[in-house]
Image: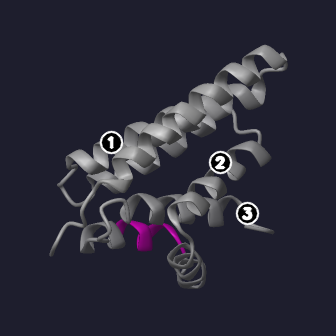
Amino acid sequence: MTNWNKTDSMAYVMFYEAKADQVITADERELINSKFDATTLSRIEAEINDDNDYQRLEKIDAYVKSNNCTEGQVENLVSEIKAVFESDGNFDRLERTTFKFLEKALKAKQRSTNLMTPHYNVTYRKKVNQLVDKFYTVFASRTPRSN
């Protein structure tokens, strides 16, 4: 993730969301293609395909931390993420679970990044870690959706 700009990070998050059910539908791909240039798309898609789920979440987390995202920026990011999920008209249970996890994690990260007291940072870090643990439990037990 070195030297990524906001566009690269957004493309990465959108690919992450589209791949939540292990299949990028034509509608999801069309939405993503409409937002980014071909060079960014091919570079970011190659990177996300090389990363495992843990690495993907770490990169998204690093984006929120390193950019000190405001509440409004996180809300915009969450809206973009939801748009990817809804783009194919099939916002299934796995996608809803993934969306809720990321929404909570991103908002907790934003709050913990912007709060100065150590108590809040520790509290939110614990909550985020609990969410990650829950997510991996659900995520590890899923089976790929067939086409």
| Bounds of the magenta segment | 31-36
Q: Report which quarter residue 146 is drawn in.
A: bottom left
The residue lying furthest to the left in this view is 147
Q: Nearer the viewer, residue 139 or 42?
A: 139
Q: Find out whether residue 113 is within the magenta segment.
A: no
Q: Residue 76: x and y, percent?
A: 53, 41
Q: Looking at the image, which residue is at 57% across and 38% down?
A: 106
Q: Residues within 10 Å of mark 2 (few under 14, many from 20)?
A: some
Q: Residues within 10 Å of mark 1 (few under 14, many from 20)?
A: some
| Residue named by callout 3 | 5
| Residue named by callout 2 | 61
Q: Earlier in the sequence, mark 1 or mark 3?
A: 3
Residue type indicated by callout 2: Asp
Q: Main secondary structure of the magenta part?
A: helix
Q: Find out whether residue 35 is within the magenta segment.
A: yes
Determine if residue 71 is in view.
no
Residue type indicated by callout 3: Asn
Q: Looking at the image, which residue is at 22% across and 45% down?
A: 93
Q: Nearer the viewer, mark 1 or mark 3?
A: 1
Q: Secondary structure at mark 1?
A: helix
| Residue named by callout 1 | 97
Q: Secondary structure at mark 2?
A: helix
Residue type indicated by callout 1: Thr
- Give the spatial CA distance, label 2 vs label 1: 18 Å
- Give the spatial CA distance, label 2 vs label 3: 14 Å
Q: Nearer the viewer, mark 2 or mark 3?
A: 2
Check whether the beta carbons of the residues at disc 2 and disc 1 lie within 8 A of each other: no
Q: Looking at the image, which residue is at 79% across and 48% down?
A: 66
